[in-house]
Amino acid sequence: MLNPNGPAKNFPQPLDKVALALVLGLIVAIGVLLLSGEAAAPRVRSFTWQDRELSAPDRAFILTFSRPMNQKSVAENLRIDPPLPGKISWAGRRMAYTLTAPVPYGVQFQVQIQGARDTFSSSNDIRTLSEPFVGKFRSRDRVLVYLGVNPEEQGQLILYNLSANPPRQLVLTPKDLVVQDYEPYPDGSKILFAAVPREATGKEVNLPKLYTVSTGIKRPDRDKGITTWEPPGKPELVLDNQEYRNLRFDLSPNGKLGIVARQNLKNPLDFGLWTLQPGEKPQRLPTQPGGDFEIAPDGNSLALLQGQGVAILSLEKQGDTVQFLPQFEQVLGFAPDGSAAAMVKFNRDPNNPRRSLFLVTTAGVEKELFRTRGSILAAEFDPTNRTLYCLVTKLIETEDSYREEPYIAAIDINTKDIKPLVILPEQRDIQISLSPDGLALLFDQVVTTSKPGNSAAAIGPRTASGAVVTNSRLWLIPLSPGTPVKDLPAPITPERLPFSGLRPLWLQ
């Protein structure tokens, strides 16, 4: 039936009127923004290194901007003071700056950006310039550890902070323990060491226990985003000597695994490797006995001398042999990224005995870098994997005798250029340590005696040949990382440190 009043009229309801007004208002606002530009200037929203303390493994920071940026203008207006060479890459609004060399230790840095523009800005519009940004971070202090040799600190672990003002010295281990060997954890917060009681006599002198001691250095936890700290000089027992003699040990690069060579006290033929992991009991690693060993940078494999060769064992598969290299007799060290190792090969021809230093890569390349009739005692890769710093000897023969003259040399891995940096006194018991930023090399110069004058000296630090160390000077060689070996100044005059010590090591 038709409506007598005609068709119904559709009048807008009050809610419809409000919605229509809002839509019109938004259209007008968007139009104004398009015509006048965005009022807020582009800015840096986050900086991943802000107020952080960095170490050598930290190689890139990220800046996140509030809007897409003109990449060229950001690069032109980025300032880092002091300068840190690096490369820029982009992913949307995120800019990554990757260092081409480790950050120098003991330095405060500042990052600034002022005057950069966004992607769609006009070069004549001052409103599109980025807000000024200033970020700050610092690198770790330059810290080394060594064994004391002076009577009042003989056999104790000592930490020395070169960056402190004035430089600060700290004894870490108690007086009643004599440290025989040690290795810092990668983050520098603790040190694993072997020690015997100062009053030890007889067989006890050769039965060290393993301990850890805190250094007082803050330990950043990258996963949890927190920093932990323990007061320095807090030793804790890790491994006793009730059933086994604890011999050489090594730590993985992440500090979560230790390998210890142990010998059964009741059965000296029972000799093998044991794993140490936090919160777990020591576990026997099922592998054939061997000599020196070193954990690879990946923490998943182990290089072990076995017979007349080097075995590469899998730590993930309980010591299964992954590869055997019969032509090499020693592993001196790994490149920081694990891509290569420095190994020694011995030419067993009795008429022409020589040792060769080889670079052995994970891709199977074996490259001879250096050959000598003397010895190759140590080698360390610089942080850029371009240079090897080596402790080698030169054989000097006369009609009725011969001797070996040690020296420290730099070898260019690519060109094989070699340059002796420092000629050392006639001694083989030298330890070298390259700083994590590649700017300095430490070494010691020991004074020994074969007739210790007291019982304390009898259990004090000794050389590999068994001579008692009565004194030891520490020296520092300044280096120029990134400079081609052929252009290095030589010889270099080392700087003597203002204290005595033995077996110095840089903390990472």
Image: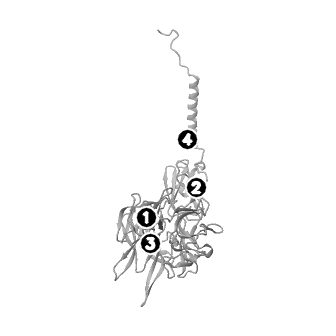
Which is nearer the N-term, disc 4 or disc 2?
4
What amino acid is labelled 4 in the image?
A: Leu
Tell me the quadrant of the picture where the C terminus can be found: bottom right
Q: Which mark is residue 412?
A: 3
Observer able to see residue 436:
no
Single out the mark in the foreground, 4 or 3.
3
**Taking 69 as reference, is 455 above or below it?**
below
- Local SS, label 2: strand
Give the percent coordinates (x, y) of residue 153: 61, 72
Kindly report the distance in space between the C-alpha atoms of the residues bearing marks 1 and 2: 33 Å
What amino acid is labelled 3 in the image?
A: Asp
The residue that appears at 49% across and 69% down in the rendered structure is: 482
Which is nearer the N-term, disc 4 or disc 3?
4
Please give the residue where the numbered disc 1 appears in the rendered image.
273
Kindly report the distance in space between the C-alpha atoms of the residues bearing marks 3 and 2: 38 Å
What amino acid is labelled 2 in the image?
A: Thr
Kindly report the distance in space between the C-alpha atoms of the residues bearing marks 4 and 2: 47 Å
Kindly report the distance in space between the C-alpha atoms of the residues bearing marks 1 and 3: 35 Å
Please give the residue where the numbered disc 2 appears in the rendered image.
227
- Local SS, label 1: strand
The residue that appears at 50% across and 10% down in the rendered structure is: 3
